[in-house]
Amino acid sequence: MDSKVIPLDALDDVITDGDSVALGGAWLCNHPMAAVRQLIRAKRRDLRLMTLIGSADAELLLASGAVSELTFSMVTLEAFGLAPSLRRGAESGSLKLVELTALSMEAGLDAAGRNIPFMPYPGLGAPPTSDLVARHPDIYGFVTNPFTDETELVVRAIRSRVVIVHALRADRLGNAHFDGTFGMDDDLVKAADVVIVTCEEIVPTEVIRADPHMTKIPAFLVHHVIEAPFGAHPTSHVPRYSFDAPELLRYAEIAGAGGEALAAYVDQIASESEDDYRRRVIGDRAKVLAEIGNQAKILQGAR
Amino acid sequence: MSDFTPAELMVCRIASEMDETGVTVLGSFTPLAYAAYMLAKLTHAPDAYMVGYNAMDMPPVELAFMGSEAAAYRGSTARWGFLRAVNVVHLANRGNVEAVSSAQIDQNASINLSVIGNYDSPKVRLPGGVGAPEVVQNYRTMLAYFGRHDRRILTERVDFATGGRYPISADARAARGLQAGPVKIITPMAVLIKRFDERPFAIESVHCGATVTDVVENTGFSLDVPNVVPTTTAPTSEQLQLLRDTIDPFGTIQFDFMSGTERIQYLRQVIELEWERAAAAVAARENQH
């Protein structure tokens, strides 16, 4: 089989305006940010974006104007505050939101991955405790349990056309190792037609075989492999680097202010290559980002 | 060491909910709750099973802003994807403790993490509830904590119910195959508890320095007030020392009590401290070579 390896900028041909795209990662961890930056360089518009627990991934794409619809359970900059571009889109009514509870969203993605039309979902109780259920009759529904005649909540299969996740390393066919946070990336990749794995480094298959227990995504699910060092920055990729708090704080302040400052931040990313981004934002700071995790202490029992 | 902050008292109160059965899950950024879990692991519940990120059985870690995630993996005993973890823990009656923090809570124990105002044209769009709806519905005890105690937060009816808990009464829960346990609200003033669907929240205890009147006046729904309201157990000096010196040297538990501006100033300081610590380690290693 030919290699599935493509350069980052080949994403421009894989994802088009109006596409549906799911992104991996969770909180401030391991979002496929190099791919996000490439979507901004390609000036994509009208994307239907999906992120389970989003942060800088959704926020930056929203800030660039690339997104017309967002499916999510949470988008936040955590310690750095509410996501300013989510707020603007939601509060102005310009952004279509499909807000789901995280676990029901996972159940819907699981259904898609297993080729099941919908999944029974008792996790929200009966009657459902979340107002989100009534807001999305196209995703949440009710069926009669054939064995008890009770009414049961179900979640429809949820899928996207494209999914992008970021791995520690992958071989040329897409067998992908993860060590630290991978969220639900291993299951997310089953719920899309086109699966893209970006990774810190592409390695010979022998390297994958040496630690097969680290392979969370098997090659047969993967369509494209992209080498993208620091590809999750400014979110984390454990064990390679922590999230970049100074950069996220800088972003949060600029995005909070909005207007020209935010437009300039986005334009800078749109106008530079990924190599230039790494040189400009990371540079010598790479060593410290790599060390921060080693310095955080595991605490020994007091007794 | 008799002086302690409301945040420290709340950490100790949440920690007392943890035991060595069931699973404790670190949810989204809730430093006060994280500190409580670490404290329980270092004191009365060393074998409590804790999940953070994809790290199963993570060890207690120092609460650093950037580095804690990596430390969680270094000491864990397994890696599970989210889907497996939520199916086995949250949705299959193995969730014990995960204290959630939301923008509002109401008399029915519904929580709001979605919007302030109208859903379609909100005054403030909030982050969304992530797994909180399932946590509060399914965990043994529903624990909700707040950095303030006022009538806008503890309100008669939330603007939007991102999640909630129904039923609450133990027998009704048991009949549905749910773990039976109450709802507890932990604030800087008091602990409130709801055991029955048909009864209001009651005052379980009031913290040293607050009065029953303060609690009633600052709560936006009616409360059952017992004849005798105990004072919340104060932290021990051992707990305070562990918390301050070992678990939370950067003071992250104060975060929920700060204004937006204070948070930015505080973040700038602690990020610099953590950055400098790592930079010094890098420099020391390079000097050796």
Image (cartoon, helix red, strand yellow):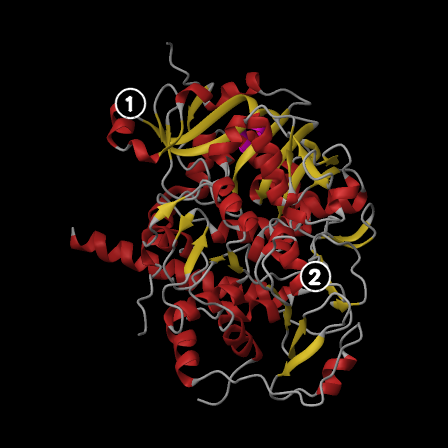
Placement of B226 over or under A125, stated as above or below? below
Query: Where residue A209 sits: x, y (%)?
Result: 26, 27
Contact between marks 1 and 2 (CB within 8 A): the answer is: no
* Residue B104 falls within the magenta-colored stretch: no
What subunit carries mark 2?
B
- Secondary structure mainly formed by the magenta segment: helix
Placement of A120 over or under B193, stated as above or below? above
Give, as a single range, the part of the protein colored magenta. A36-40
Name the residue tied to disc 2.
Answer: B103
Q: Give the residue displayed 32% in from the left and 35% down from the top.
A: A213
Q: Disc 1 and disc 2: Cα gap in Å?
A: 49 Å
Q: Nearer the viewer, residue A74 or A103?
A: A103
Q: Nearer the viewer, residue B75 or A51?
A: B75
What subunit carries mark 1?
A
Query: Where residue A303 sits: x, y (%)?
Result: 30, 74
Query: Where residue A242 sits: x, y (%)?
Result: 41, 49
Q: Can you see residue A80?
A: no
In the image: residue A219, left or right of residue A60: left
Name the residue tied to disc 1.
Answer: A205
